[in-house]
Amino acid sequence: MIIIGERIDSSRKPMASAIERGDADFIKKEALSQKDAGADFIDINCGTLLDKEALTMKWLIGIVHSADALSLSIDSPNPDTIKSVLPLCKNGPLIINSITAEKKKADEILPFVKEYDGSVVALTMDEAGMPKTAADRVVMVEKILGFAKRHGVEEEKIYFDPLVQPVSSGQDQAKIILDSISMIKKLGNAKTICGLSNISYGLPNRSIINATFLAMCVAAGLDAVMIDPLDEQLMSVLSAALVLSGEDQYCMGYIQRHRRVKQKI
């Protein structure tokens, strides 16, 4: 399971404030705390800053690299921003977030994926908007796989995001995502990813919904997740789910996490 830490995001009020005042120490601490909590990648998202996005992202990349805080997930809807910051990403594997099933966007981003030998998050939607069913999402997946093949990007470099919608808006939303994950996994070597917190939007005690849904997604075959790794309940449930799904060989990840948590007490 690949864990992408989501805390360096300008849409979060504490992060927006730190960026505004140029607080590199705060940002460095955020990166290191996510690393220590088990993140494999640090996501950097400055999407709310519009014309300052590229400049701010370059600054944040430098801070995260100075902290030796793992590899990066570059999160931007703007191909020009992505192109400008990629030469700065030097800490091992790289994730570019994201493309869709829109040909124009895929054709802009996939050459970067190939050039930098990175992976890419692919959102299962196109110009028509959000698909309604798991089968509709698979159609998006097949379109994106076709784009990737033309650009020489291997299937295993693609992480498909079936786009979680709030269960409060439709009782079948969780099942649609679980079915989507299972169906995508049957198509070949492509991987699956989700940002799961949207599932609980509008409901009380959201953390228990998020944690339960994460365990269900792991059972369905989820390969990667974008979460807050400082959420102890979420990380504990993920650790247990990986044991029960057979993904944690000899339960070593679970045991090591237990020891780390015990040392903090």
Image (cartoon, rainbow, N blue to C red):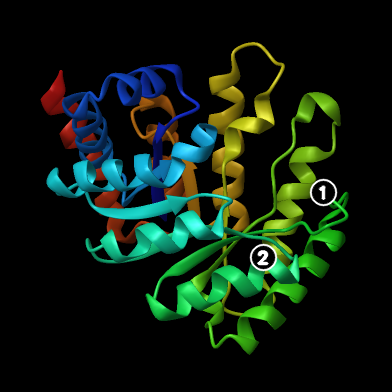
Residue type (three-letter) at the residue carrying disc 2: Lys
Which sits earlier in the primary sequence, circle 2 or circle 1? 2
**Does residue 25 lie above or below 60 as drawn?**
above
The residue at 54%/88% (across/down) is 152
Q: Secondary structure at mark 1?
A: loop
The residue at 69%/47% (across/down) is 163
Question: Visible in this render: residue 46?
Answer: no
Q: Position of residue 96 (x, y in %)?
A: 47, 60
- Viewer-proximal residue, 41 or 19? 19
Q: Position of residue 213 (x, y in %)?
A: 61, 37
Q: Quadrant of residue 135?
A: bottom right
Residue type (three-letter) at the residue carrying disc 1: Met
The residue at 78%/44% (across/down) is 175
- Viewer-proximal residue, 95 or 188? 95
Disc 2 crowd rating (10 Å Cα; few below 14, some 14-19, many 20+) is: some
Question: Visible in this render: residue 219?
Answer: yes
Q: Secondary structure at mark 2?
A: helix
Numbered mark located on residue 130 in the image = 1
Q: Quadrant of residue 203?
A: top right
